[in-house]
Amino acid sequence: MPDALLSVEGLRKSFPGRGGGLSRRAVRAVADVSFHLRRGETLGLVGESGCGKSTLARLVLHLIAPDGGSVLIDGTPFTGASERQRRKLRRRLQIVFQDALSSLNPRMTVGVNIAEPMRLQGLGTPAERHDAARELLQLVGLRAGDAARYPHEFSGGQCQRIAIARALILHPDIVVFDEAVSALDVSIRSQILRLILDLQQRLGLSYIFISHDLGVVKRVADRIAVMYLGRIVEIGPAEDVVRNPQHPYTRALLRAIPIADPRRMRVQDLGLAAADVASQAPPAAGCAFQPRCTLRLAVCVQEVPPTVQVAPGHTAMCHHVAPGNALASRA
Ligand SMILES: Nc1ncnc2c1ncn2[C@@H]1O[C@H](COP(=O)(O)OP(=O)(O)O)[C@@H](O)[C@H]1O
Ligand SMILES: [Mg+2]
């Protein structure tokens, strides 16, 4: 992808199983993931809890090492770079987590917290870092004077603003939001989403926006990637994916949107065939989704589905999907 700011190719990561003895089967958290991110766009990444979204984010940021695959930023390999190069590349990518308060150091003032990435990178004098933090506080809708206060003095939404300020202090190109608004009440969530979009416009940022809630993702994303058991099963322009979903899993997630509290989303709400298996291992053969799929055919049990392009930039991994044989035409 020539105009990609970020390219991810064939990323893989397994973890040792958590059970004891024979049940210690490795968990394939990220199976074989490739995607790209263009400058200025938001890629939404959606899927149920346990499908591998956070692991993928940590791999992209090189907070953990992949078992295989690569990450390129502006064509420069992040994977396999020297420690010095990696340090420089790391500045260009920042992450905001769900639990802002616990990601801030309670013993440091908000100003010192925000400036910490600068200090770790050996940038600026203490006075310069302090000024930068004060400026960022205003940019995220707080007061410059808040720099002298401590994290526990702020609400959840305000802490998320502080975490965003800290993510911006190194002038990154890419910000990954990992469930960054999931713990917030609806009205606060809307305010933070507006701030995130406003900052993107003002600073020309590119985003990977991760959430288990497709209803939130579709409000902010230009493109949407749907993840199931470590794989991207559908990806495309947000409008295409929402209006013309191809994978049965995407369709199930879309049906689940009106449920009042998405954190309590249960499988029966998804209208799928079997019990909750999202956190379990995929079947030994065939499509990972087939145990839950209401459209299962013999081929689904036997063969891994190919990735099929259904429209420009819109692909899905499903035996039912073929150019001209799209699920949409069967609905
Ligand atoms: N450090 C770890 N050790 C063992 N298993 C892990 C670890 N991190 C994640 N996993 C497992 O990998 C899978 C994907 O987890 P995660 O990436 O956190 O999913 P998500 O963010 O979509 O909820 C889960 O089965 C989870 O239990
Ligand atoms: Mg997660």
Image (cartoon, rainbow, N blue to C red):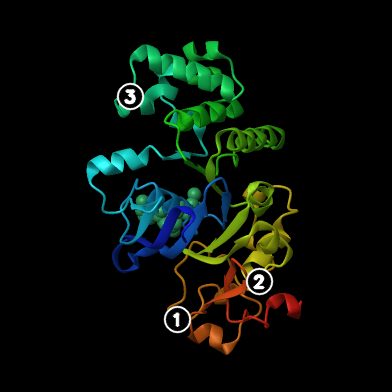
Q: Quadrant of ligand 1?
A: bottom left
Q: Of the residues under marks 3 and 1, which one precedes in the sequence?
A: 3
The amino acid marked with disc number 1 is Ala
- The answer to which of 237 and 289 lies nearer the viewer is 237
Which tag is nearer the camera, tag 1 or tag 2? 2
Which labelled disc corresponds to residue 262? none
Q: Which residue lies furthest to the bottom in this view?
A: 298
Three-letter amino acid code of the residue under disc 3: Leu
Q: Which residue is drawn at the image coordinates 53% and 40% (left, top)?
A: 205
| Residues under numbered marks 2 and 3 in contact, where contact means CB atoms less than 8 Å apart | no
Q: Is mark 3 on a helix, strand or loop?
A: loop
Q: Is mark 2 on a helix, strand or loop?
A: loop
Residue 247 visible: yes
Cα separation between marks 3 and 1? 51 Å
Q: Name the residue under label 3.
A: 123
Q: Position of residue 177 (x, y in %)?
A: 52, 42
Please name the residue that numbered disc 1 is placed on: 285
Q: Where is residue 62 in the image (x, y as percent from the top left)?
A: 34, 48
Measured in 3D between alpha carbons, the distance from the residue under mark 2 to the one under mark 3, in whole angstroms, is 48 Å
- Residue that protrudes farthest toward the front in the picture: 2
- Residue 325 lies in quadrant: bottom right
Q: Please name the residue shown 47% across and 19% down the image.
A: 133
Q: Real-space Cα distance between discs 1 and 2?
A: 22 Å
Task: Give the secondary structure at mark 1.
Answer: loop
Does the residue tagged 1 have its C-beta within 8 Å of any atom of ligand 1? no
The 10 Å Cα crowd at callout 3, few under 14, some 14 to 19, many 20 or more, is: some
Q: Which of marks 2 and 3 is nearer the N terminus?
A: 3
Q: Mark 2 points at which residue?
A: 246
Please say if the residues under marks 1 and 2 sit with CB atoms less than 8 Å apart.
no
Along the line of sight, the residue nearer the viewer: 167 or 252: 167
Inspect the image, locate mark 2, and give the three-letter code of the amino acid beneath it: Gln
